[in-house]
Every structure is written in structure tokens, then in C-alpha cells.
Amino acid sequence: MTAPPDTAPTDADLLAASVHDSDCFTTVYDRHYADVHRYVAGRLGPQTADDVVAETFLAAFRRRAVFDPSRGSVRPWLFGIATNLIAQHRRAETRRYQALAQVGADRHPGGHDDRVAASVSAERLQPSLARALAALSRKDRDVVLLKALAQLTHEEIADVLDIPYGTVGSRLNRARKSLRAALPADTEGL
């Protein structure tokens, strides 16, 4: 690996090394699993998230030899893979938001893992916000949820979605206006 001996290897170094030593991929997985899972669980629910995150890391492992660090870092690359897989589950996501809008969030989720995921996921959304998210275009919803659930920067979102940096801001601004208009006047923070 190319990292100096006194520093931890970068994700890009680990991916490159994993082509010849697959155990190196484990560190990439360990570093990013929780964040990717939290994002996917917020989009599709904790049950579906397990499968989609597994598919995400399997796809990353299979494509690790073609990863190009000049196009961005590993983290947005993983979120890009996850977002593409979420697109395959888009109908389920929309149905989930519509159902949440009808019945609200489960105030007593299952075990510890479910409670942790629920505290940052769409299960905690108020019905009006769930309805508003379901009404957003797919492109605007992707930007909002990559920002809110994955806590990615504008630059990382641009990398994930392969769109210009300015487009991220435009979509985020448009989505925030739509969400504000759909939510009660006392809602803050959007």
C-alpha cells in the first residue's frame, strides 16, 4: 500500500490492495457499513436495508478493480452504488412514505439495532413530511435524503449522482421549498 507507515491506509489504498488481498476490503466494509446501512434503512426500512447494503458491498467488492480515485473517494462511490440499488426498490420506498403518511411512525421499534436505525430513519418522520417526501421527484428526493440521512456534502452528492455541484444546490433548494410548503408553519430546520 502507498500510505506512510505511521498513518492508516486510505480507502482507495485498501481497495487497490484488495484486488490482490481480498482481506483488505474488510477494513473498507468496517469503515462504511454503518453509514451506508443508516442511509438505506432511512430510505427503505431496516428489513430491506440489510439486503440492499449486502448487495452494495458485494457490488463494490466485484468492481473494486475498476474503482477510479480520480473521480472521487470511496465513500461517495459506495453511496452511489447504494442509491442505484435503492432505485430498484423505488416503488417500495414510495409506498413506505405513503404508508407512513397514513399511519405515522412506529413509536416502539423492535430491538436495539432497530431503535438506533429508527432514530435517524424515515420511521421517525411525521406523516406530513413522509407525504411531502413521497411527492418530491426522484431526483430531488435522492439529493435531500443523501444530505439528510447519509450526511454527505454537496460535493459528495454530486459524485454519487454524477451531476454538477451546482445542480445539487438547485435540487436541494427546490426540494426544501417544496417540503416547507407542505409542512406546518412551525417546522424549523429545513
Image (cartoon, rainbow, N blue to C red):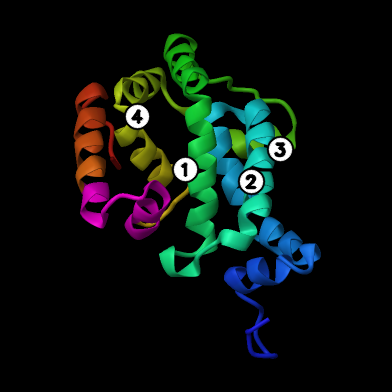
Any part of residue 166 in sight: yes
Which quadrant holds the N terminus? bottom right
The quadrant of the image that shows the C terminus is top left
| In-image side of 144 versus 12 (left or right) | left
Give the SS element for disc 2. helix
- For label 3, the residue is 113
Residue 107, by quadrant, is top right
Amino acid type shown at disc 3: Asp
Q: Which mark is residue 149?
A: 1
Mark 2, Cα crowd under 10 Å, few <14 / some 14-19 / many 20+, is some
Tell me the residue that label 2 is attached to.
59
Question: With 174 as the anchor, is 36 left or right in this view?
Answer: right
What's drawn in magenta, residue-wise? 154-169
Front of the two marks 3 and 1? 1
Local SS, label 4? helix
Q: Which one is earlier in the sequence, the residue at label 3 or at label 1? A: 3
Question: Quick one: label 4 or label 1, which is nearer the N terminus?
Answer: 4
Marking on residue 138: 4
Element carrying mark 1: loop
Q: Are marks 3 and 2 in contact (CB under 8 Å)?
A: no
Q: Are marks 1 and 2 in contact (CB under 8 Å)?
A: no
Q: Is residue 168 magenta?
A: yes
Q: CA distance from mark 4 to mark 3?
A: 28 Å
